[in-house]
Amino acid sequence: MKKSLLAVITSAILVSGQGQATDYPLGNVTFNGSVSGGTCTFTLSGQSTSGTTVTLPIVPVSSFTGLRSAAGRTSFSLNISGCENAVYNDNIQVVFHGTAESVQISDAFKNAASTNPATGIALRMIDGISLNPVTPNNAAAAAITLTNGAFNYPMAVEYLQSTTVAPTEGNVLVNSTVYISY
């Protein structure tokens, strides 16, 4: 008795719905995602990486003695934490995107100050592990090995004379977007 009543109710629902609406295909929808072992947390010298400012000291133009001379080195660190070693060990790459100064000085970032810009000056970032310059838009280090899911990546930034002509005083500004691949 229960089975036949259910069949009658189901048939009544199907029959009653046929005259009310027509289905039109609208198109395909793709759903996409991935499952990872977790995420990492990143800070720059202990601050959120969004909107962080690293301030260099004021240096006199007399600090620069020729092409590629540097002054005002300022240390900072990229702090990585909360990663799962088994998933991310040796797979983390850091890239600072920005505009390179020129072909002659390709390992420094171009001064983008719009108000009273210093001329002949760029900013060069230094990888604190290898002590090599960080070239704009290239990986800063070959690989970062995590210890207990964390790593403090020492870095520095400095003014760099980017021309053979003596630099002029003024403002220096570089905006760089940090990309982390893991």
Image (cartoon, rainbow, N blue to C red):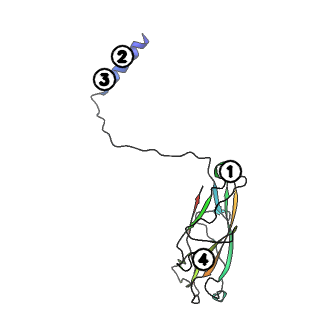
Residue under pointer 2: 8
Circle nearer the N terminus (4, 3): 3
Residue under pointer 4: 123
Q: Does dot 4 land on a helix, a strand or a loop?
A: strand
Which residue is nearer to you in this view: 90 or 20? Answer: 90
Circle nearer the N terminus (3, 2): 2
Type of the residue with mark 1? Asn
Residue under pointer 1: 85
Which quadrant does the C terminus fall into? bottom right
Spatial separation of the CA atoms under disc 4 and disc 3 = 75 Å
Q: Does dot 1 land on a helix, a strand or a loop?
A: helix
Most extreme residue toward the right is 148
Most extreme residue toward the left is 19
Residue 85 percent coordinates (x, y):
68, 50
Type of the residue with mark 4? Leu
Residue under pointer 3: 15
13 left or right of 149 in image? left
Residue 48 percent coordinates (x, y):
62, 61
Q: Does dot 3 land on a helix, a strand or a loop?
A: helix
